[in-house]
Amino acid sequence: MTQKSFNGKTVLLTAGPTHEPIDPVRFIGNHSTGKMGYALAECFAAMGAKVKLVSGPTNLQTYHANIKVKHVLTAEEMYKAVLKYAEAADVWVFAAAVADYRPKTVADRKIKKAGDELTIELVKNVDIAAALGRQKEEWQFSVGFALETDNENSNAREKLRKKNLDMIVLNSLNDPGAGFAHDTNKITIIEEHATHSFELKSKKEVAQDIVNLIWERIYG
Amino acid sequence: MTQKSFNGKTVLLTAGPTHEPIDPVRFIGNHSTGKMGYALAECFAAMGAKVKLVSGPTNLQTYHANIKVKHVLTAEEMYKAVLKYAEAADVWVFAAAVADYRPKTVADRKIKKAGDELTIELVKNVDIAAALGRQKEEWQFSVGFALETDNENSNAREKLRKKNLDMIVLNSLNDPGAGFAHDTNKITIIEEHATHSFELKSKKEVAQDIVNLIWERIYG
């Protein structure tokens, strides 16, 4: 049996949520804990890769010495960090739950409670995976994540194509025990010509499944 | 020296942020970590009080056996829990950073990214401290918290009066090292006829200062 290894490869990983500030106190967040992305980072590092982990706010820490973490808060900060590291990375894995929208204006001061209603106008954030897809080179391998509640497979396959991804990992919010805040996850990996469904497993095991398939596609 | 004790007293405490869901994935949150409220809970319990802690989402745990925690997510859930425990409690401390507004409608399904702009309409949440102020009995002692960036003292004094509080603890976001996500805090305690300013201290020490002053007002 050959020992699978990513020796000499650099992996760029994003993980966690982003927080989009409304004012100094309030923000729009999401329920990502970062567990899936951090598990992937450990997995790649254990197999010899150098890992650059761009992480939104989480309570997690990394253990392997080959993982270097860059902490960011907003989608825009995450995009800047990703741009900086992407060019030199062999594998990109976009596991973060990046906010699609941010408040149009951020108040310098805490917004005082006044009227009975308040409207927040949001503008679209850069789609990091899609933007990177436009600069991807032939030798680079790009993996996206999708969390869907509706038309899961067809939405995921559309993202694969539009974002120039080699692989997309689909989490379904409809599967009990899968997705945010759980220690388990149930995924489907979608490639251009293949779909792989996995059982409910620990996020650590799920990470190994994903990393194994990436290894197969690069070295297999 | 008399040993200060809250033996036989019940304290209702709120702590942490609230999360107001936009859809199954996104929410509006705030930067409260709950550290101040949890430090107060330990302090009251160590002095003999029975503590009912109504906590928003945090990563903290309690240590003293006299603290019973009720976990909630939204402002509305927090209000319901507070209503349930308030009547029997001798002391109320509203240390949670409750969202003033929540999304008017909560989507059942993840909102798909579509237009370049998105508007979220918010409606006001119940002001828990103010609502409770209207049912406060003579023998009950009520403490609020205020986090201000502008006109700090006058805003805090207005809250004291409007919410029928006996005491308000003012955190200033303008003080470096004070407020959210820090382990230290710099507070001013405002009563109807007195203002007490404290130095920058650990949140544990700040909690002791607050609890000591409450003890003075009840037993002193």
Image (cartoon, coloured by chain):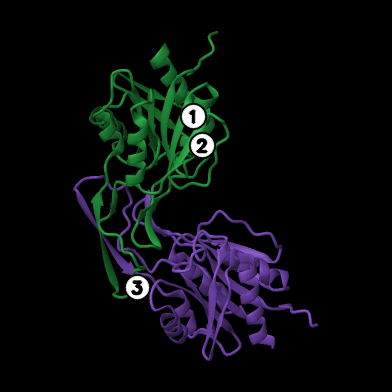
Chain colours: A green, B purple
* Residue A163 in which image quadrant: top left
Pinpoint the chain carrying mark 1: A
Q: Residue shown at 35%/62% (left/top)?
A: A23
Q: Do the numbered discs 2 and 3 sit on residues whose CB atoms are within 8 Å? A: no
Tags 1 and 3 touching, CB below 8 Å: no
Q: Residue furthest top?
A: A1
Against A201, residue B44 (above or below) is below
Residue with the mark numbered 3: A112
Q: Is disc 2 surrounded by few (<14), some (14 to 19) or many (20+) residues within 10 Å? A: many
Residue B198 spot, x, y in % from top left: 58, 76
Read off the residue under disc 2. A184
**What amino acid type should be assigned to the residue bearing mark 2?**
Thr
**Closest to the observer, A213 or A81:** A81
Instruction: Determine the secondary structure under disc 3.
Output: loop
Q: Quadrant of the N terminus of chain B?
A: bottom right
Between marks 1 and 3 in the image, the one whose residue lies nearer the viewer: 3
Residue to which mark 1 is pinned: A206
C-alpha distance separating marks 1 and 2: 8 Å
| Mark 2, secondary structure of its residue | strand
